[in-house]
Amino acid sequence: MNDRFWIVETYLLFRGNIQRADLTRHFGVGNVTASRVLQDYANQHPSNMIYSPSHKAYVYSDGFKPSIPPKPEAALQLLGYGIFENTFSKNTCGPSSIPNLAPPLDANIVGTITRAIYSKSVIEVSYISATSGEKRRYLHPHAIFTANGTWYFRAFDENQDDGFRTFRFSRVISAKSTFKNSSINAIEDKHWTDEVTLSIAPHPNHPNKNALATDLGLSDSPVKNIKTNKVLAPFVLQELRVDCSPKGNMPPEAFYLRLMNCNEFDGQNFMSWAPGRSGKA
């Protein structure tokens, strides 16, 4: 029952609602069993959710107190990528975990942000930036993603002239709902919706280019084309350690790959964070 209650609480805290169909999809149970799970949870934790006839769902209550420790990173995997964390008690041949410098995320802060995405509402946050320090911001969040071991969300910032920005969950000091509906449409975030092609090849100065070509699965083509959006492009290039410098003069021992169409992105600020460009780390 703990797994089922964990799913109930995860959807309530991080999405804002739970439906019978969520349980049938996760656990392969029938509608009768799913209804019983929800009723059992409601009986045991009556202050955590309220049934909304208009939504045909149980919705998050302000009196919510989790009965099972929440896992914000697992919830983000579920909401962002549809990946349901499940641990098997069999012998494995890998490490128990991969070291990560990122601190544990605050479940209440993450939940406030992700519920705002699903309810299309505005939140007030205190956010600490590497360039401008701590500031209060009014954000309209609309998407989440992970890159290089860090979780991010994309949002419209009312305080910025250029509007849409990428934010780290770990840098949000506090967050609360304004109970205002957002008038911003996610399709207005052109850096999120616009697709780019990254043409990647073994670094020309690397002594073992054939090995790198094998890594990329290159046989009939000199380059590997990766399609992504403008927001994710620099993160992809960072993670793959691709030399994006104009002259391709980064050390090939550290940057095995080279962005072959880097000239296409000259003057485009979304690429300023890619390795070898002008952005700050």
Image: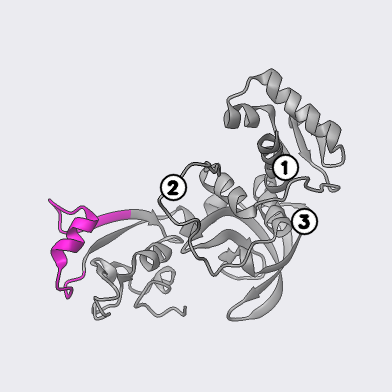
Instruction: Report crowding for label 3: few under 14, some 14 to 19, many 20 or more residues within 10 A (C-alpha).
Output: some
Name the amino acid, label 3: Ser
Which residue was labeled with disc 2? 92
Q: Quadrant of residue 275?
A: bottom left
* Position of residue 120 in the picture relative to residue 76 (left or right): right
Q: Position of residue 171 (x, y in %)?
A: 64, 70
Which residue was labeled with disc 3? 177
Helix or strand or loop: what does disc 1 sit on? helix
Tell which residue pokes out farthest to the front in this image: 91
Circles 2, 3 touching at the beta carbon (< 8 Å)? no
**Mark 1 vs mark 3, CA separation in Å:** 19 Å
* Position of residue 72 in the picture relative to residue 260 (left or right): right
The image's mark for residue 142 is: none
**Mark 1 vs mark 2, CA separation in Å:** 29 Å
Which residue was labeled with disc 1? 9
Given residues 36 and 49, the one toward you in this image is 36
Magenta residues span 203-226
Q: Position of residue 257 (x, y in %)?
A: 25, 68
